Image (cartoon, grey):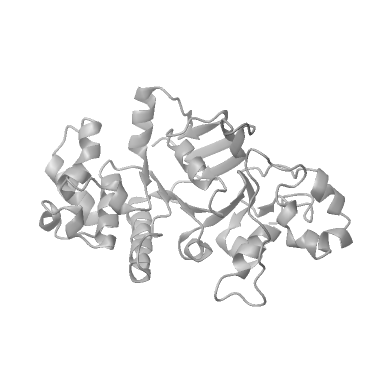
Amino acid sequence: MTTTPNAPLLTVRDLGVTFPGRQGAGPARAVDGVQLDIRPGEIVALVGESGCGKSTLARALLGLVKPTAGQVTYDGRELSYSQRALRAHRRQVQLVLQDPSGSLNPRHTVYDAVAEGLRIHGHAGDERKAVADALSRAGLRPPERFFLRYPHELSGGQRQRVVIAGALVLEPELLVADEPVASLDASVRGEILALLLRLRTELGLAALVVTHDLGLAWNIADRVAVMYLGRIVETGTVEEVLTSPRHPYTQALLSVLPEAPGTPVVLSGEPPDPSRIPSGCRFHARCPALANGEAERAGVAEACRTKDPAVLNADTRSQSACHLSPTGLMPA
């Protein structure tokens, strides 16, 4: 890694991913003007409802989806989409999917599942040692006891550890974990989150954790980026965003957590179709601040309906793309 101290490991600038519309609809802007930085050893939680574009953004960072606008830069180099460049990139940036049962081939042993990445990338070293080391780091010890086992012989937590070991075996610098504990029992989720935190401490791994679960973000993240309809609408440290949320969307998401004080805020309707993004703030049709008159009293209701808030930059300080905070950038 050649990243200078405090410089981002991965940067995203003005990133857009647009898919062709279906059944006569216009193009769907799944990701729209996203800016984001991830620094070495940092864990960033990307939070939002299903369908907001989180997983599409995650896949764009790995080159599994090619952006239609903007750029992804890793370790100072802009991501290229040639087969050779993508192979090198994916050695450093590894994906961990939410469903270990779907990620693992039921016909492959644990050994073969973990060794697959080494074989794809032409690993010239001791394969057996590399697989054993990866399994040990993922908490499957002694690793040799798992070599010849098949996925159906493992618990859900053990399968997820195998998936993580398959990512670790290539010694990446960044993990992109898409809902890494969503399919696990509550009793196992804490173990996997503790594992990710330990890997950050021991290996210096950075991670982007994609989740709809704000409680998970609180337990694992350094920073949070809240996404709505293809765009990041609030960012900041986990303490700033989850204890003093500025955007009405973040406030509503937090209000329904079991431990949240006060009355839950139930958002009306579903998020708009990304092929029919409304004018003005894309959240305005569901915004409690408009519904309860707060935006009107602040004199921004018309702007909410007609003016798109500025796209948030990649600054690490707390920001909110909301007309109720017109400068966007919050005080440090």
Q: How many marks?
A: 0
- Asked whether the viewer can see residue 131, the reply is yes
Quarter residue 149 falls in:
bottom left
The N terminus, quarter of image: top left
Camera-side residue of 54 and 76: 54
Q: What is the quadrant of the C terminus in the image?
A: bottom right
Position of residue 294 measured from the top left corner of the image (x, y, whole percent) = 82, 63
Whether residue 168 is visible, yes or no, is: no
Q: Residue 144, percent across and down?
A: 11, 54
Of all residues, the one furthest to the front in this rendering is 23
Counting from the top left corner in percent of width and height, residue 247 is at 69, 58
Is residue 21 found left or right of 60 in the rendered image?
right
Q: Nearer the viewer, residue 103 or 42?
A: 103
Name the residue: 74% across, 53% down.
285
Q: On the image, which quarter does residue 27 sit in? A: top right
Up-down: is 198 above or below 166? Answer: below
- Give me the residue at 41% from left, 59% from top: 182
Residue 107 to residue 137: above or below = above
Left or right: residue 2 versus residue 54 is left
Examine the rendered structure and indicate whether residue 195 appears above or below residue 23: below
Using the image, determine if residue 182 lies above or below residue 1. Answer: below
* In the image: residue 67, left or right of residue 332: left
Query: Which is nearer the eye, 48 or 208?
Result: 48
* Residue in the image at 80% along x and 65% along y: 292
Quadrant in the rendering for residue 30: top right
| Image position, residue 226 (x, y; %) | 59, 53
